[in-house]
Every structure is written in C-alpha cells, then in structure tokens.
Amino acid sequence: MAESTQDQASQDSPPTAGYCSWHQRIADGVQRIQLSEAGSGGTVHYACVHCIRIFKLTPYEAQGQ
C-alpha cells in the first residue's frame, strides 16, 4: 500500500509558500494573479491571501469562471 506524505499537494491547491509580488515577501498560500493592465506584458505575479483581499485581486484560476 502506498503511503501519502504531507508534502504532496493536489493539482487544484495553490502552492503552500511563495513570493507575494504585492508585499514583496515570502508568504503561505500564494495564488497566481495575471495582470491585464496595458504595459504589463502579460506578466504573471503571485499574491498571498491577505493581499488578494486587501487589493481585491482575482486569482488566475477564477478569471475563467
């Protein structure tokens, strides 16, 4: 029987930690944000849960819904 480990994440879950482009620090639960502003060049950034709420950002996965 295969054992599951805690470091395995499902495909739908965001990374557990990463760089938040808004407050410019490593944070837990970052999500991909795609800017649609002119001049952004389609750059993809990541934001933590707190910055998503504060700045009213839309995670990339939710934009297609």
Image (cartoon, rainbow, N blue to C red):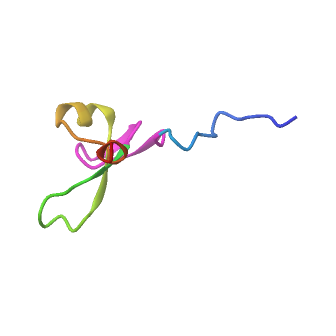
Q: Position of residue 8 (x, y in %)?
A: 64, 40
Picture quadrant of residue 27: top left
- Number of labels in the image equals 0
Answer whether residue 15 is magenta in the image: yes
Q: Depth check: 20 or 11 in front? A: 11
Residue furthest to the left: 38
Task: Name above or below for residue 28 compared with residue 64.
Answer: above
Q: Depth check: 34 or 29 in front? A: 34
Q: Position of residue 28 (x, y in %)?
A: 41, 36
Q: Is 32 displayed left or right of 13 in the figure? A: left
Residue furthest to the front: 65
Picture quadrant of residue 62: top left
Q: Is 61 displayed left or right of 37 in the figure? A: right
Q: Depth check: 16 or 32 in front? A: 32
Q: Depth check: 45 or 11 in front? A: 11
Task: Name above or below for residue 40 compared with residue 54.
Answer: below
Q: Is 54 displayed left or right of 64 in the figure? A: left
| Quadrant holding the C terminus | top left
Q: Name the residue at 25% across, 64% down.
A: 42
Q: Which residues are magenta?
A: 14-30
Q: Position of residue 5 (x, y in %)?
A: 70, 35
Answer whether residue 19 is magenta in the image: yes
Q: Name the residue at 63% across, 39% down.
A: 7
| Quadrant holding the N terminus | top right
Task: Name above or below for residue 30 compared with residue 50.
Answer: below
Q: Name the residue at 13% across, 67% down.
A: 39
Q: Position of residue 2 (x, y in %)?
A: 83, 37
